[in-house]
Image (cartoon, rainbow, N blue to C red):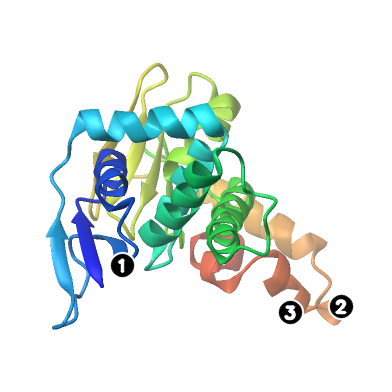
Amino acid sequence: MHFYLFDGTAQGFYTAAFLAYADEQAFLACENTQIGLNDMTMPVTNDKDKAERVLKKLREYDRAAEAEIDAVLRSHFSDRAQRAFLYLRLLVRRRGPVRRMHAEPAVEGALDAVRKVRGETHNMTGFLRFTETAGGVMYAPCSPDNDIIEYLFPHFKARFGAQPFVIHDLRREKACLYNGKDAALLPLGKTELVLSDDEETFKNLWRDYYAAVNIPERRRLRQMRGYMPVRYWKFLPEKQP
């Protein structure tokens, strides 16, 4: 196996795809991937021109596939870069869209990752809970399976308007910050929050509402877990004691 190791960026991926295109033993992965003793490593140096050449072909044959590949690269699968590469290579070789070719493993592998990413993005628009800080900024911690906070940002920007907010991915230690006008994606580890005076009141009101509409005799925990996966509960005030 020939491991093409890139830095995890989109430009790095497309550079690696350019270099590995004709290599039938190619396996694309990020630089921190464990490599076997008998495998050959092929370190990839980002090259804007090579990456742009691949993107040009991709957009020529199937412009919509660029967003799909971005979603695959944001998925939680350890082989996400290889899934994206095999999908891209098949598309270029076919010179057109391949997403309907479900019998192709390269297609199903990529589209499965796309479904996971888009499904979690949709769920998180409903599960994300914001806390008001003393400075008036709305703060939402999360720990999604997939790297999706940049996908979540447009939805909450539309909802909040000019209200500043932060979406903090604790697992990846980064956050989308919005000041009401401009946005930035920045590294952010653990943080200490000073909450507004009304925040605890808001949380208690929400817990009271949740308790009032809940009927203990009709609890359906299995169904609840299906609609609201347990891994999200730690960020929901209504599920806190």
Query: Label 3 is placed on what type of residue?
Result: Leu
Viewer-closest of 100 and 112:
100
Question: Which residue has dot 3 on it?
Answer: 221
Q: Mark 2 or 3, which is nearer the eye?
A: 3
**Which structural element holds mark 2?**
helix
Above or below 79: residue 180: above
Query: Label 2 is placed on what type of residue?
Result: Arg
Q: Residue at x 47, y 53 (%)?
A: 72
Can residue 98 be seen from the camera position used here?
yes
Above or below 233: residue 61: above
**Disc 1 versus disc 3: distance between alpha carbons?**
47 Å
Query: Alpha-carbon neighbours of circle 2 within 10 Å: few (<14), some, or many (≥20)?
Result: few
**Which structural element holds mark 3?**
helix
Say whether disc 2 or disc 1 marks the residue closer to the N-terminus. Answer: 1
Q: Residue 218 got which mark?
A: 2
**Disc 2 versus disc 3: distance between alpha carbons?**
9 Å
Question: Which residue has dot 1 on it?
Answer: 25
Locate the C terminus by quadrant: bottom right
Q: Residue at x 54, y 54 (%)?
A: 117
